[in-house]
Image (spheres, rainbow, N blue to C red):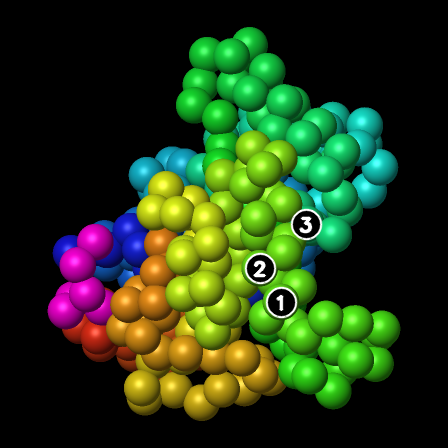
Amino acid sequence: MADDRLIVALDVSTMDAVKEIVLSLGDSVSFYKVGMELFYAEGAKTIRFLQEQNKQIFLDLKLHDIPNTVAHGVSSLTRLGASLITLHGQGGPVMMKAAVEAARESGETLGVERPKLLAITALTSFDDESWTAIGGQLPISDQVIRLAKLAKDCGMDGVVCSALEAKMIREACGDDFFIVTPGIRPSFATTDDQKRVATPASALQDGASRLVIGRPITQAENPREAVRLIIEEMENVSK
């Protein structure tokens, strides 16, 4: 039985690969992430295919531009029917407010539920050394909390953050704030190139709403069994 707290990352670049993953996982997974690699390669047909399979979609394109451009982008993406859309919190309050308004207006015009908008805080590939190298003045965790509070004030629905910051964001932003955590590695998997990682159970216990997991499932010898093991790790944490 699928657990919609699990989002499987489709970090592939062809429709053939998408179909192989989604059809092989069947009803064990209800939520998929479509990111830049796949969307830039195959476009909206990836979304249409997932909708045909009755899946929810996390469209992770990390929009970051001037407010007007991002607002128009959100309007276009709202028409596709994704459940979650990301934009960079570092785009600032004017950009985020414009995106929120665009999603609301597009949803009303189309007569559909608008997507939840999530602010990217700090990418999980950052560690302290690389964060300092790009001029980070605050510690990563402080910057993440600052951006999360700003996103909430701007009307955003939640954030994407490392599981290591999820507990602090939950405490700072409340129970209704949506927290999506990539960089999740189940107990049987390696960390790959992610620096700030956590297990599924610990991330949920710390306040994550949804978990994004890619390679430990899609590159597993038996992907469906990998999903079963992950959901087993999640089961002891109440929704």
Give the tally of numbered discs. Answer: 3
For residue 60, above or below residue 77: below
Give the label on residue 142, or none.
Answer: 1
Residue 158: give x, y in percent of width and height. 50, 46
Q: Along the polypeptide, which appears first: circle 3 or circle 1? A: 3
Label 2 or label 3, whichever comes before in sequence order: 3
Please state which of the two labelled residues, at mark 3 or mark 1, is closer to the viewer: 1
- Which amino acid type is shown beneath numbered disc 3? Gly
Distance of mark 1 from mark 2, alpha carbons?
Answer: 5 Å
Q: Are marks 3 and 1 in contact (CB under 8 Å)?
A: no
Q: Residue at x 21, y 54 (%)?
A: 239
Q: Is residue 66 left or right of residue 186?
A: right
Q: Which residues are magenta?
A: 234-239
Q: From the image, give the main secondary structure of the stretch colored magenta.
A: loop
Image coordinates of residue 165 in percent, x first then y, are 49, 68
Residue 237 or residue 81, whichever sits in front: 237
Task: List the residue tagged with mark 3.
Answer: 89
Other-residue count near label 3 (Cα within 10 Å), few / some / many at <14 / 14–19 / ≥20: many
Q: Residue at x 47, y 58 (%)?
A: 169
- Is 209 magenta? The answer is no
Note whether residue 218 is visible: no
Q: What residue sits 68% from the left and 37% below the top?
A: 96
Q: Does the rendering let one see residue 78?
A: yes
